[in-house]
Image: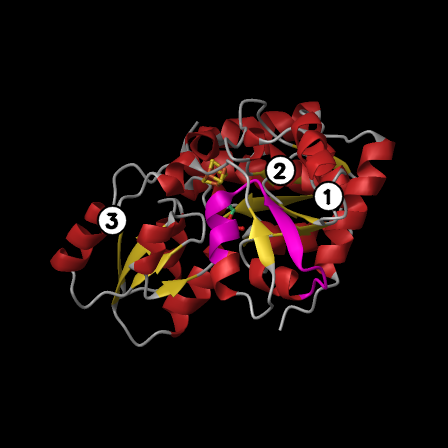
Amino acid sequence: MELMAQQQEVRYWLEKRRAILLAHNYQPGEIQDVADVLGDSLELSIKASQTAAEVIVFCGVHFMAETAAILCPDKTVLLPRTDVGCCLAESVTAPKLLARKAELPGVPVVTYVNSTAAVKAESDICCTSANAIKVVNSLAAPRVLMIPDQNLALYAARHTSKDIEILTWEGWCNVHDGLSVEEVREAKAAHPQAPFIAHPECNPEVLDQADVIRSTSGMLSYVREAAAREFIIGTEKGILHRMHKENPGKVFYSPSRRLICRPMKRMQLEDVIAALKENRYRVTVPEDIRLRALKAVERMLAVPRD
Ligand code: 13P
Ligand code: SF4
């Protein structure tokens, strides 16, 4: 089926099912173009918690749809594919976290939303790349364990205004962590006028090269408002689709051909149509886990955003 017809079919089924389509900034362009809401993890969680729609179709990776299911137990949350995991979220399990917590009695756990519901349920508070520093600053403890992204934890440790020790976990995103300083230096040499904007999941040496460090939506507002005309974008390439669309006349460069999140790229329009027609694949969270995970997510949402 031709692209426009497929997109029309998605809209038809969304209306018929009283559904809303939420899509992450890394999704393929044709999915972004048909979504009701595009955003980073934090924005999509907030939107999921506020929507009046009966069905939420989540185009992203598994933990994102699970977060929507944690926030909206009365709604049907559909993830159109089953093979869309996040390697970072998979780097920690609830039993592994419980074992580490036993070694650190009384130390609060700050958990990046890129994690399973079972892990969130064993955590004190969640954070996203957009609010990690604010979340850490909101805590009174002298020491916290920040999981699973080591790079995000090191970034928060460097930028917190609190006198707080941040213990890390051995986890990272293969896509962001794989970006090298050499690739960034080459991109900067090729485009000397372009500021380099990095995602906090990048490794510390790459973050040292950054002019600004932002979540995906933070990057979008930065490039919209900046006077610069060219930018080097240190995150997954899918975001360039939205950047081009929202900023005609500005130019965006990716510093590496490897900045591609395969699970994000698996999602196709036909998966979304099938999800709506066949009510698949419903994401649910057992109620005891959901309630405990919800506490950690709600504690995060209560941290003032500005
Ligand atoms: P954002 O919350 O910045 O969109 O990041 C999510 C993610 O998975 C980054 O790799
Ligand atoms: Fe997970 Fe990395 Fe993909 Fe983000 S880019 S969803 S952290 S694998």
Residue at the location (85% across, 41% down)? 291
Q: Amino acid at mark 1?
A: Ser
Which residue is depicted at the point 60% across and 31% down?
92
> Which is more toward the observer, 168 or 175?
168
301 above or below 76?
Answer: below
The residues tagged by marks 2 and 1 sit, at their Cα atoms, a distance apart of 10 Å
Given residues 89 and 283, the one toward you in this image is 89
Residue at numbered disc 2: 115
Question: Which residue is disc 3 drawn over?
Answer: 181
Mark 2 in CB contact with mark 1 (< 8 angstroms): yes
What span is in magenta?
A: 138-155
Q: Quadrant of the C terminus?
A: bottom right
Label 2 element class: loop
**Residue 10, horizontal then vertical, whole percent:** 57, 37
Asked which secondary structure carries label 3, the reply is helix
* Mark 3 C-beta to ligand 2 under 8 Å: no
How far across and how far down the image is residue 34, in percent? 52, 45
Q: Position of residue 188 (x, y in %)?
A: 18, 58
**Amino acid type at image mark 3:** Val
Cβ atoms at labels 3 and 1 below 8 Å apart: no
Tell whether circle 2 marks a residue whose Cβ is less than 8 angstroms from ligand 2.
no
Asked whether 208 falls inside the magenta stretch, the response is no
Element at badge 1? loop
* Mark before the other along the chain sequence, 3 or 2: 2
Q: Residues within 10 Å of mark 1 (few under 14, many from 20)?
A: many
Outermost residue, bottom side: 227
Q: Is residue 166 left or right of residue 226?
A: right
Disc on the earlier residue, 3 or 1: 1
Q: Callout 2: few (<14), some (14-19), or many (20+) C-alpha neighbours within 10 Å?
A: many
Which corner quadrant of the image does residue 111 belong to? top right
